[in-house]
Amino acid sequence: MGQGNSGKEVSNTQQTSRWHKYESYSWQLDLTTQEFSCEPQAMKSLFGYSQPTISAKELLKRLPPAQRNKAREVLRAAISTHRVRYFHCCIMTPDSLFSYVEFKITVEEHSLLKGTLLPCLVIPSDIVAAEIFYAMFENFHHGMLVTDEKTRILACNRHFEKSTGYVLEDIIGKETSVFNAEKLSSDYYKNLWDGIENNGHWSGLILTKRADGSTFPQKLTIHKVSPGNGESYFLGLGTDLSDHLQCVDDRQAGGVDLLTQLPTSDAFLNNIEDDPQPISQENIQIILALQPQFPEPNAQETKRQFASYLLGNKLISHAGYIGDDRFAVVMKVAIADKKQGIRLIRQAIKTFFQSFKHSQSSVALSLKQGLTGVSIRYSRDMAPKQLLSHAVQALLELHSGQDKRVAFYDRNIHEQVERKKCLEIWVEESIENDSLQVFFQPIVDIKQGRIDKFEALCRFPKHPQIQTSTQELINTVEDIDKIVELDDALNKKALSCLPELQSLFGQHVGISINRSFNAKQDIMAILRHTTQSIDDSGIPANKVTIEFTESAYFAGDRYQEELLASMRKAGVLIAVDDFGTGFTSFDYLNKSYFDVLKIDQSLIQGIGAKTRQYHVVNAIVQLAQKLKLKVVVEGVETLDEYIALRDLGVDCIQGYFFSKPLSIDELRNVEDYCTLPVIDGSSESSVGTISELVTPNLPRVDPGESLSLIYTYFSADELNVLPVVETNQCVGLVDRVAMNLHMTPSMGTDHETNKENSIWQKAVHRMMSPPHAVLDWRLPLGEVKSLLKTHALPWVLVDSDSRFKGLVEQERLIQYLVGNEI
Ligand code: C2E
Ligand code: CA
């Protein structure tokens, strides 16, 4: 039927004999006289004329208007080509409703056309016409849709309803744009309507949206019908290809691959270009070229499901189909710490692969068995097109016979990722084979001069080729989500060694164990679990400290608070590990979940009396004391660090200065272990001298320090006066009154002006006053009473080199005098 209207060209040799229900008739048309004649019987039955000849015009009048033009076109084509033509049309016959006929047209001479006329189908009545129309419209294979000239839906057949999920009632009167899947480019639709406008019809592949929002591919033909009654209709005829996906495999329309419904290469690359997100060393894009292995015989269906899984995958910012069963995706990764770059890249790719666990098994398997090429985009200047071709190149370098299934375009990254993969295997095997060891590092209480506890640290067997660190291996264990197993094993070993450590170093000695929250298991489960393993070990809870690093995991909800509280009630101490790195905030210290603050090594490196670190650690120590937290400083390596920290009032020191982590075997053989160093002068006894009266742990401030710092001290503590110390000399004192003189009532409130705001920066030396009384710290206590008469308080105590040793204030002095009954 499709071929008829346009008058198909057929060569002379191609004529076939056909069975005819009706007789065929000869005709001829003289173009010079415009006379048409044919056999009398046909003239009568088909055209209703008794005479042998009628004008060409009369003949055409018997055809519906749109078909007249076609007839003219075919006749012209026959003349110009001199070839046989066939033309199908309807003739409005006198004794029946109409007849569907075939004209065979041959060119006899230049102006004489001849041929035969075959009535194929005589439609005797409107009832027959209606039945035939109905059977054709309501067929079981094609969706049919009729709209008015504004594409408003007039009717559709049942098959259309079935394939789209719509019912006619819901869509009647609506425009056909309701079926627009909004995936194909607008150009595609423009071409479609241009085609209809110019040729009266369009045919092609298209994606159609169902009532439930899903999309299916179909072969669609749209005809514009203008029957001459002043109205026009669009007639749509579609074949749903959902069950014939091979018809759309690797075929695209409007920038979209029809089977996968993903953007094709160009559209995908445009999407990346148009993405406004910044790209930098810190915000990279990972481009993956994926070549999954789709299983036969359902390759196309799995491919479609694979694509739909990609589309719904939240890890991906862009996905595309690049042909030949290959896909491309882009993921964004934030790299806060450069050193973690490879780890984060690898993690992102692993997470992407793992996300397929939730897809149908055939989809997950096809990805797993497929190949992946990776390239990395560090800056906007790197063209997406080039990166995609890099990723594809990396993919092509993989051979399906190999074990390796992921390759990086960048050699360096590739090697680093391979290294990481080896480490993952290494740590997993170490955990499975139970070849982990526990080492112990002493935490020395420098006020009491003895080992307080040992921190248990994990040791892996040495990898034969790869240089690594415990930290990296622990991170790797976290990446493969085996940290809970590792911590369990290590904790158990560590707890079992405590009795021996106590017999070696004293019964007071405790054990500090590390617990990571960087696991899929939730915090509550890990905490409960840890409590259980302490109970199982038979070690008294008050000898155990648990160190947590990832404070960010604390939601601070009621359940966590209660659980921590109950653990602490049982005697377990909770320590914040690596304080000063990562996410730890002062705010959550205040929540009193913890007993111990472990200050990270990075915070004390290069600490000296006047350094910035000194002030930072000083502030932390002050705060910790106020919150009644014990302070441990990690990574102390030198005597200078030790002295500086001791002077700041730190409770415990851990670090190579005392000992590296050692195995229990090594600890059995140590001598003079962890004794406090003798430091010139300062270890002299202060007994019986006025230095006993010094206010303990009084912060010292630098003359250049700002008003805001002393304001913090005075607001946080019950302090009266602060010594201002420069190169170990006390150069002045600041008290609350002096500070208040420099402040205004609105400072620190919403009404603070810019000028007032700048007052916070005012230097301490501008508000200090010189010390009234400077006394030798070795003066005997017995002289206190007479000194009181001659020297106003507070007293600044100094050593023989005028180095500041502390302040004596009224409160302690009175306590002393009361104790000694003045
Ligand atoms: P961490 O908890 O901060 O442990 C202290 C780390 O500092 C240990 O490294 C220790 O050997 C090292 N260290 C101690 N004193 C000094 C010093 O004076 N100078 C220097 N440069 N380093 C010092 P290690 O044993 O390599 O462990 C690294 C990290 O691995 C630990 O840091 C901890 O976060 C983690 N870790 C170790 N064992 C375990 C474990 O059993 N479970 C968990 N979850 N994490 C563990
Ligand atoms: Ca630790």
Image (cartoon, rainbow, N blue to C red):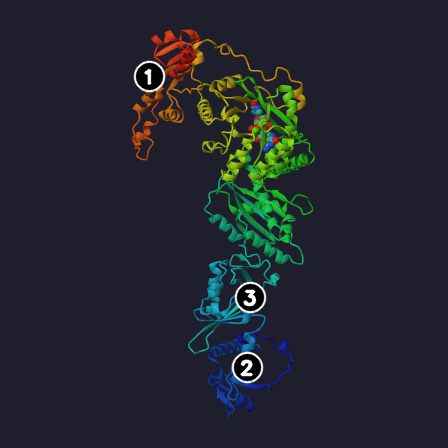
Q: Position of residue 517 (x, y in %)?
A: 56, 36
Quarter of the figure with residue 472? top right
Q: Which is more foreground, mark 2 or mark 1?
A: 1
Q: Position of residue 357 (x, y in %)?
A: 61, 48
Q: Position of residue 204 (x, y in %)?
A: 54, 65
Q: Amino acid at mark 3?
A: Ser
Q: Which residue is mark 2?
A: 100
Q: Amino acid at mark 2?
A: Tyr
Q: Tell me the residue at 57%/56% (across/down).
A: 260
Q: Residues within 10 Å of mark 1 (few under 14, many from 20)?
A: some
Q: Is residue 401 above or below residue 479?
A: below
Name which of mark 3 and mark 1 comes first in the sequence. 3
Q: Which residue is mark 1?
A: 769
Q: CA distance from mark 3 to mark 1?
A: 91 Å
Residue nearest the viewer, comparing 793 with 568: 568
Residue 302 vs residue 791: left or right?
right
Q: Element type at marker 2?
A: strand
Q: Tell me the residue at 45%/12% (across/down).
A: 692
Q: Element type at marker 1?
A: loop
Q: Quadrant of the N terminus?
A: bottom right
Residue nearest the viewer, comparing 747 with 600: 747
Residue nearest the viewer, comparing 820 with 326: 820
Q: Which is more foreground, mark 3 or mark 1?
A: 1
Mark drawn on residue 163:
3
From where the camera sits, is residue 201 visible?
no
Q: CA distance from mark 2 to mark 1?
A: 117 Å
Ligand 1: which quarter? top right
From where the camera sits, is residue 432 visible?
yes
Q: Is residue 399 above or below residue 656?
A: below
Q: Residues within 10 Å of mark 3 (few under 14, many from 20)?
A: many
Name which of mark 2 and mark 1 comes first in the sequence. 2
Q: Which is more foreground, mark 2 or mark 3?
A: 3
